[in-house]
Amino acid sequence: MTTNTITPGPASRLWMAVPAVSFGGIGVGLLLMEVVRFSYGFWAGIAGCVIASCLLFYQAYSKPRRDLVSLFTPLYAVLIFLIPNEVGSMVIVQVVFAATISLLSVRVEKLFNVKKTEKKTMKQMLNEYIMRIEPLLSRVDEETGHLVAQALLRFKFGLYESATDNCNKALDRLRAIEPYPRVLERALLILRERASGLAISRVVTYPEHVFTEEDSEYLAIHLPENLVDDPATLDLDNTLILLYAVGIETSPLDEQALEEHQRFIIQILESYKEKLAEAAAT
């Protein structure tokens, strides 16, 4: 699964300078030739077109995406106007060139001011989440991390009584951690409550332990209330992802086992694909 990220480039009014400079130069040239009777007045139009082509080059180069046609306009200007020929001095040629680069300038601003769609996989999102909660992970010692990892793995394999026991042991060790990791405590309590219920074939519909608003920065899945079908399931899924992150980052003994079951966590994230996209769009 992938999520799409579109990043707009900075707003710019540089595109307005391209028609202003090019047509302005042509206008000055016509004024010099028709009013002042200066026979070399056409050079003002040439200068305007060449300078405007350089402005277009800079505009195109500064965008998130590059338009090759616009990047080569200074070269076209040199070939048309600066290499000795009869064409460059013709006003009609200057007008056509100015109109062309003006259209290109608008095109660059409208079509190339947005980066290409970037695709982010759920594995990348998981890795970014782990990096985001590094301040929490750095406070967890190896033994506690091992108990957390074992609680998660045994829950996954249906060994609910053993998972409950590991949750209790991990909760006991949390008391030695400063500052106290309350979000990790709640995650272990949520897993313990669910495992205890499943051990006796009881589904916990209204759990006693839930995440609070202060825990949100440490949770992988954030959804507005209107997109949450079952808060208890969302809390459990966030619990499993959090405990996975704690285990794989703090327990070398369980790293390989957790990596082998990473797909389990990825599937949890993938199940929220549409809702995460909908939440991002609002």
Image: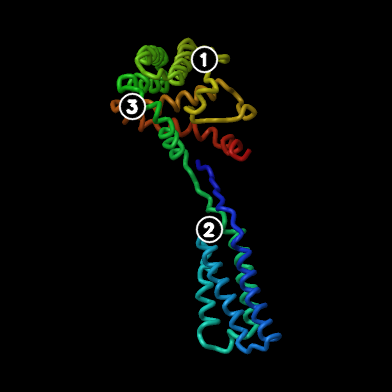
Q: Nearer the viewer, residue 183 or 251?
A: 183
Q: To which quarter of the image does residue 256 belong?
A: top left
Q: Where is residue 23? Give x, y as percent.
A: 65, 74
Q: Where is residue 140? Give x, y as percent.
A: 35, 23
Q: To which quarter of the image does residue 132 belong?
A: top left
- Residue carrying label 1: 209
- Above/below status of 1 relative to 33: above
Q: Where is residue 107? Give x, y as percent.
A: 61, 63
Residue depth check, mark 1 versus mark 2: number of the one nearer the observer:
2
Distance Cα–Cα, label 2 vs label 3: 42 Å
Secondary element type, mark 2: loop
Q: Which of the numbered marks, if any, corresponds to residue 221?
A: none
Q: Is residue 80 left or right of residue 159?
A: right
Q: Where is residue 244? Give x, y as percent.
A: 40, 27
Residue depth check, mark 2 versus mark 3: number of the one nearer the observer:
2
Under mark 1, the amino acid is His
- Residue carrying label 3: 250
Which residue, as the protein is rendered here, is positioned at the far front? 36
Q: Are marks 2 and 3 in contact (CB under 8 Å)?
A: no
Under mark 3, the amino acid is Thr
Which residue, as the protein is rendered here, is positioned at the far right? 35
Label 2 crowding class (10 Å Cα cut-off): few <14, some 14-19, many 20+? many
Question: Sequence order check: which comes first, mark 1 or mark 3?
Answer: 1
Distance Cα–Cα, label 1 vs label 3: 24 Å
Q: Nearer the viewer, residue 27 or 116?
A: 27
Q: Which of the numbered marks, if any, corresponds to residue 63?
A: 2
Question: Sequence order check: which comes first, mark 2 or mark 3?
Answer: 2
Which residue is pictured at 64% across the width and 81% down the height? 29
Q: Is residue 227 left or right of residue 4?
A: right
Under mark 2, the amino acid is Lys
Which residue is pictured at 56% across the width and 51% down the height? 8
Q: Is residue 19 left or right of residue 171?
A: right
